[in-house]
């Protein structure tokens, strides 16, 4: 086992443990903090996969913005006993667990027994540049639509969060 | 022959319906006259067709053909032969009478007559088209107007009209679902064989289908058409449906609509799928026996006039089915005549019952008695219909039953003999009913009833005349039908058994 | 590459932005013209798409397709949007201040659909999908004072997010085996591998969520019932057609795998969907819920065409999707008019509609019967195509199930007809919809009847559109 | 040697945990967080595949960027919805959202 393998195993363990924490904690604040850790673990994995730019995006958007948003929302809607705030359904816990287990095992078996195709080359040196070329080249439609999507989401979120006025 | 006479006949009622829709709902008289006018024109045109049909030529005449949807092979194709002309005449006769039988409708007149005319168009379309797709199109057009008419203008005597309407609709639709599967299978298979999509009945008849496929599709058709024809044990909708339906609908339903089932079995079943027909026919014959005997027994215990006629119509359809199942020239001739004969008879019966019910608000046999005193004209109508129903010589029904038995005897001996015995039951319940209702001492409570007059006379005159003229001069009709059935049988390549007449 | 090939998309995007800006700039009183602007904008988009029909061009190395198939669906979405705007304007007006943004969300949802139908590549497809669904989340929850609406919005968001995740996981596996996300290239790199099968199954599940096929339909009726009724209408028609457009393109072009017959999986899904959708619809008492279950069943029918996968089946998919726009939106337009008048969507509210407004009742009846597949209305021809395809492909049992259940469906459609024609109602004042609703209703009625009696033009259009398969 | 299979298995496990959370959590925010786990799992897959299989182009990374953008938008709308619903019901427990049933 060389160093990079070790690093992978450690990051993977951290990520998975944190993810288990997200669904395992009964207190939603703990879950949220666990989620941040998991996001960071995923970011570390991106760095190992030579996707540094994605790692940065992950840290900024997910571990930063999304997490902060979630934590703010939790603070706004926290009503009950915090230790009971992220409980599972009594019944759904079991069949939910079963389904999740089946999905994981099924997919895992499929992935484990697949022979993957050979790599068709190596990642470009300047991956950010390559991304930019794609975004503004072949994928310009998706790029523009994504911009509109963010606009829609922002306007929509404001309308929904602001609530109905006295007018109706 | 350049102008499209069949299209005109077919769409006259529809045009009438459209005119009615544009009229104001208060103008009830105008609406009724439009309806009567439209059906009268149709009737006259259909007579022109019947007379103008060149018997020496035979085959399908007055052909109209417009390509419709190429990739489904659908053509707007009309044409008539010796089998469809009697049924076309039947439709226009009953359609015209039904308008007059509904003359006293006073509620939602506009909707009633538009739906009635759409219904008549739908029924007529099935007999006129020579395209399978168009046939099915018209076939299902009739179901929904009937439902609406039953729930809006029906009567809730023994069963509620909602129940009756829904039962009728669902039975027919389930039947048609099977039919549609068969039809699509036929279409897909013919495309595989011929390499081009076609819905033309003639093209389909010339296509070679494997025997197992034919049996499968014919079985589906037997179920679909059988349900429509109230084949035992899929008949349960029919008496309830008639009882719940308004008079005009009962007339059209018992008179013509059921005949689409028989017509379909002959035209689509036997002509396109002769090999399938040969396998399935014995089963149909046995079930038909169920119709004849079982329904006749039920009739004996009925008290409601509409139920009596309803079950008797189930019983009579048994004869038609036996005629079809016997698969020979004579028996199928008989089946077609029987369809015509039963149609006019049942329509007349329902018209009379409807009129009586409208005035007395009851249909229970026991309530009546001696009506011949107060309502002689109505009694005449009842007598004609009743005697026709039990197959009295001199009425067209006799010709039909007799021909069926002669034809069927060569195919199914024992079964035919049993079926003939059904006539005895028929005579029993018909005579008893007629006696109880019309004869006997005069009952004071019915003195206020007014006899048929004015427009109410039209159904009696038209349908009664058809019964008697058909009975006295059967040969014109027979000749025509024989012509049509003959070419169909040779088309299907069936054995020509009999030829006694 | 010509930019003009993207003209409909660009026009719709600009329309959406224009509406947002107008909503801010116009004085309060002037905002009545928002509906008119939307309508005109969509008409232009319709003309642009129609002009583009018949082009077959792959843009951006196949990432975006300007082909007849996409154009057919573009026309469909824009028509649906037009009808929703026409029939919903009275309803939308009641939203007060928020009505302005409502129009632009509708337009952006429409843009998402258009992108989905024309995307030749999975990333673009996904972004189109998300633009559409995010707009719909917001629209669903738009009645902020109504608990049902907000609840439906949240449920839709959770369901939508889960289904997207499942779909994406499937895509990632397909990408892993094939090494590409361009639809036309995936087929060339197709290999029979366990991960590929798993990926296809997950993608089926993801699309099944989007199409609310059984057993992934759980929350669909809730969402339909809770959403404002024009949104429900657009959701039932547009988003479903868009999901089908993408589903068919991806599966027919990219994922043919002889060793794994996913057609059979879809056939079972279709059968379950048809049976359950129709049976549960039988007991509904709310018109929105009834139409929701009926749309679940309708998606099952459309799926039958895809299962068949042959010429008739695929043509049936397109044909049916188009007629479904008119028939379903006609029914929804009547329901909207009734709700605007009575404030209720229960079937009780339809009682005696035949007397109050014979025209509304007649249109409702015709549209519902078309959905049930009764000739000579459009639905019948559509089902004829679909089931011809199915029987041609050897799925006779599926045709039996489908046709039998479609006759069962007549029962609940007729229950509505019964309420309209023989029920009695305390309030007998006629319901008079506004002019734009009436126009929408007449369009729906005319199209439903015309397509039924003369299907040739639409069928020719669909024929052109499926050339690429 | 850590190869593609290892990364994909990690993604699968993460996805499974997310599925469990989605199915079992009662708090709407909790469900949203579980969805984020599922999306992260997907992203790991895309980026890993990009490196090990299809490395001539950065399509996988591009997909991941789009997913992150969409996820952020979805979270924003989702949390706004949760706020809106909390205003009415004073609860974000999905068990309480049963106004709409069969």
Image (spheres, rainbow, N blue to C red):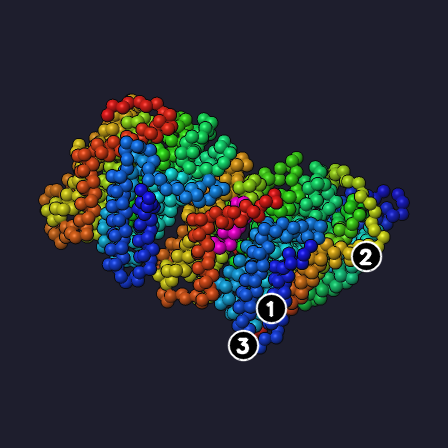
- In the drawing, what numbered circle is on residue C29? 3
Left or right of B53? Residue D69 is right
Count of numbered badges drawn on the protein: 3
In this orientation, does residue A121 appear?
Answer: yes
Q: Secondary structure at mark 2?
A: helix
Q: Is residue C182 magenta?
A: no
For the residues beneath circles 1 and 3, the answer to whether they share a chain is yes
Sequence-wise, the earlier of marks 1 and 3 is 1
- In the drawing, what numbered circle is on residue C240? none
Q: Classify residue B127 by image quadrant.
A: top left
Q: Which residues are magenta?
A: C315-328
Mark 2 or mark 3: which is in front?
Answer: 2
Q: CA distance from mark 2 to mark 3?
A: 49 Å
Please determine whether, in this image, residue C159 is positioned above or below residue B302: below
- In the drawing, what numbered circle is on residue C19? 1
Residue at point 27% right, 23% down?
Answer: B499
User: In this orientation, which residue lies closer to the viewer: B341 or B476?
Assistant: B476
Please determine whether, in this image, residue A110 is positioned above or below residue B332: below
In this orientation, does residue B285 appear?
Answer: no
Left or right of A109? Residue A53 is right
Residue at point 15% right, 44% down?
Answer: B379
Q: Secondary structure at mark 3?
A: helix
Left or right of B262? Residue C310 is right
Q: Position of residue B124 (x, y in %)?
A: 32, 44
Residue that carries the numbered disc 2 in the rendered image: A129
User: In this orientation, which residue lies closer to the viewer: B191 or D73?
Assistant: B191
In the rendered image, the quadrant that contains the N terminus of chain B is top left
Q: Classify residue B211 by image quadrant.
A: top left
Q: CA distance from mark 1 to mark 3?
A: 15 Å
Q: Position of residue B24 (x, y in %)?
A: 30, 62
């Amino acid at each position: 086992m060389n160093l990079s393998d070790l690093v992978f195993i450690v990051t993977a363990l951290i990520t998975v443990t944190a993810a288990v924490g997200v669904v395992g904690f009964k207190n939603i604040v703990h879950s949220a903090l666990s989620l941040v850790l998991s996001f960071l673990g995923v970011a570390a994995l991106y760095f190992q996969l030579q996707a540094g730019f994605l790692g940065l995006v992950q840290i900024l958007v997910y571990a930063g913005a999304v997490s902060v948003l979630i934590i703010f929302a939790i603070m706004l809607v926290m009503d009950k006993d915090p230790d009971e705030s992220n409980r599972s359904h009594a019944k759904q816990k079991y069949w939910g667990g079963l389904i999740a287990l089946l999905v994981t095992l099924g997919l895992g078996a499929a992935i484990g027994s697949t022979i993957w195709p050979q790599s068709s080359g190596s990642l470009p040196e300047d991956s950010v540049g390559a991304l930019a070329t794609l975004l503004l080249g072949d994928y310009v439609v998706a790029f523009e639509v994504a911009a509109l999507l963010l606009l829609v989401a922002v306007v929509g979120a404001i309308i929904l969060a602001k609530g109905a006025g006295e007018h109706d | 022959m350049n102008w499209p006479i069949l299209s005109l006949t077919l769409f006259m009622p529809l045009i009438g319906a459209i005119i009615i829709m544009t009229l104001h709902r208060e103008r009830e008289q105008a609406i009724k006259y439009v309806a009567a006018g439209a059906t009268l024109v149709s009737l006259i045109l259909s007579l022109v067709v019947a007379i103008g049909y060149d018997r020496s030529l035979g085959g399908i005449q007055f052909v109209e053909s417009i390509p419709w949807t190429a990739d489904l092979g659908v053509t707007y194709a009309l044409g008539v032969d010796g089998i469809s002309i009697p049924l076309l005449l039947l439709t226009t006769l009953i359609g015209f009478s039904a308008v007059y039988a509904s003359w006293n409708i006073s509620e939602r007149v506009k909707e009633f007559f538009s739906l009635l005319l759409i219904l008549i168009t739908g029924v007529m379309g099935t007999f006129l088209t020579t395209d399978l797709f168009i046939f099915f199109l018209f076939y299902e057009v009739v179901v929904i107007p009937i439902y609406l008419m039953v729930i809006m203008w029906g009567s809730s005597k023994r069963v509620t009209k909602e129940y009756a309407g829904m039962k009728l609709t669902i039975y027919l639709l389930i039947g048609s679902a099977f039919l549609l599967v068969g039809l699509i299978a036929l279409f897909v298979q013919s495309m595989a064989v011929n390499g081009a999509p076609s819905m033309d009945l003639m093209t389909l008849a010339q296509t070679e289908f494997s025997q197992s496929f034919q049996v499968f599709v014919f079985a589906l058709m037997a179920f679909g058409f059988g349900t429509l024809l109230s084949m035992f044990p899929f008949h349960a909708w029919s008496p309830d449906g008639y009882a719940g339906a308004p008079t005009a609908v009962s007339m059209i339903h018992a008179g013509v609509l059921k005949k689409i089932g028989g017509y379909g079995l002959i035209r689509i079943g036997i002509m396109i799928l002769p090999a399938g027909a040969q396998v399935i026919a014995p089963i149909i014959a046995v079930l038909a026996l169920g119709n004849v005997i079982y329904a006749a027994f039920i009739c004996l215990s009925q008290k409601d006039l509409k139920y009596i006629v309803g079950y008797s119509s189930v019983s009579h359809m048994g004869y038609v089915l036996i005629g079809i199942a016997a698969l020979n020239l004579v028996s199928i001739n008989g089946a077609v005549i029987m369809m015509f004969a039963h149609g006019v008879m049942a329509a007349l019966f329902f018209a009379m019952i409807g009129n009586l019910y409208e005035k007395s608000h009851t249909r229970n046999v026991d309530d009546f008695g001696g009506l011949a005193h107060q309502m002689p004209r109505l009694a005449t109508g009842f007598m004609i219909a009743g005697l026709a129903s039990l197959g009295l010589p001199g009425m067209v029904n006799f010709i039909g039953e007799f021909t069926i038995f002669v034809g069927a005897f060569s195919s199914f001996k024992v079964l035919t003999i049993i079926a003939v015995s059904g006539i005895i039951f028929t005579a029993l319940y018909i005579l008893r009913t007629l006696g109880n209702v019309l004869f006997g001492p005069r009952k004071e409570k019915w003195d206020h009833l007014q006899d048929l007059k004015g427009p109410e006379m039209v159904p009696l005159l038209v349908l009664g005349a058809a019964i008697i003229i058909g009975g006295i001069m059967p040969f014109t009709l027979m000749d025509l039908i024989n012509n049509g059935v003959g070419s169909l049988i040779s088309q299907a390549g069936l054995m020509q058994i009999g030829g006694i007449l | 590459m010509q930019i003009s090939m993207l003209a409909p998309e660009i026009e719709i995007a600009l329309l959406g932005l224009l509406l947002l800006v107008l909503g801010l700039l116009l004085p309060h009183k002037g905002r009545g013209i928002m509906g008119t602007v939307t309508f005109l904008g969509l008409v232009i988009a319709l003309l642009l798409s129609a002009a583009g029909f018949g082009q077959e061009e792959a843009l951006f190395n196949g990432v975006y397709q300007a082909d007849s198939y996409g154009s057919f669906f573009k026309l469909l979405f824009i028509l649906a949007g037009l009808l929703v705007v026409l029939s919903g304007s009275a309803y939308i007006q009641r939203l007060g201040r928020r009505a302005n943004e409502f129009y632009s969300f509708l337009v952006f949802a429409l843009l998402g659909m258009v992108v989905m139908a024309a995307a030749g590549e999975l990333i673009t497809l996904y972004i189109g999908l998300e633009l559409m669904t995010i707009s719909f989340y917001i629209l669903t929850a738009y009645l902020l004072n109504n608990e049902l609406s907000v609840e439906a919005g949240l449920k839709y968001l959770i369901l939508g997010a889960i289904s997207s995740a499942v779909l994406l996981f499937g895509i990632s596996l397909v990408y892993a085996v094939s090494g590409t996300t361009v639809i036309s290239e995936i087929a060339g790199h197709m290999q029979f591998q366990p991960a590929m099968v798993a990926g296809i199954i997950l993608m089926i599940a993801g699309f099944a969520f989007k199409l609310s096929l059984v057993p992934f339909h759980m929350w669909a009726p809730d969402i339909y019932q809770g959403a404002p009724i024009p949104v429900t209408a657009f959701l039932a028609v547009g988003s479903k057609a868009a999901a089908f457009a993408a589903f068919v393109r991806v599966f027919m072009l990219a994922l043919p795998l002889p060793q794994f017959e996913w057609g059979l999986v879809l056939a079972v899904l279709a059968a379950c969907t048809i049976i359950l959708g129709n049976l549960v619809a039988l007991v509904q008492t709310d018109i929105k819920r009834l139409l929701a279950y009926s749309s679940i069943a309708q998606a099952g029918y459309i799926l039958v065409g895809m299962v068949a996968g042959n010429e008739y089946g695929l043509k049936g998919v397109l044909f049916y999707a188009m007629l479904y726009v008119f028939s379903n939106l006609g029914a929804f337009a009547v329901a909207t008019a009734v709700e605007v008048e009575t404030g209720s969507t229960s079937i009780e509210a339809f009682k005696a509609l035949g007397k109050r407004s014979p025209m509304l009742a007649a249109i409702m009846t015709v549209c519902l019967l078309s959905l049930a597949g009764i000739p000579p209305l459009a639905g019948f021809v559509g089902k004829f195509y679909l089931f011809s395809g199915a029987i041609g492909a050897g799925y006779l049992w599926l045709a039996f199930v489908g046709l039998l259940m479609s006759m069962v469906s007549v029962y609940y459609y007729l229950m509505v007809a019964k309420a309209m024609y023989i029920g009695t109602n305390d309030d007998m004042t006629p319901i008079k919809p506004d002019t734009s609703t009436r126009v929408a209703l007449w369009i729906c009625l005319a199209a439903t009847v015309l397509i039924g009696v003369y299907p040739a033009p639409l069928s020719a259009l669909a024929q052109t559109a499926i050339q690429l398969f | 040697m850590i190869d593609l299979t290892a990364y994909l298995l990690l993604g699968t496990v993460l996805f499974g945990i997310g599925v469990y959370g989605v199915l079992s959590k009662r708090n709407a925010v909790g469900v949203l967080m579980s969805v984020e786990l599922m999306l992260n799992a997907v992203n790991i897959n895309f980026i890993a595949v990009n490196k090990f299989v299809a490395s001539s182009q950065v399509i996988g990374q591009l997909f991941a960027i789009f997913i992150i953008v969409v996820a952020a938008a979805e979270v924003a709308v989702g949390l706004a919805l949760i706020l809106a619903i909390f205003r009415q019901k004073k609860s974000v427990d999905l068990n309480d959202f049963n106004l709409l049933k069969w």
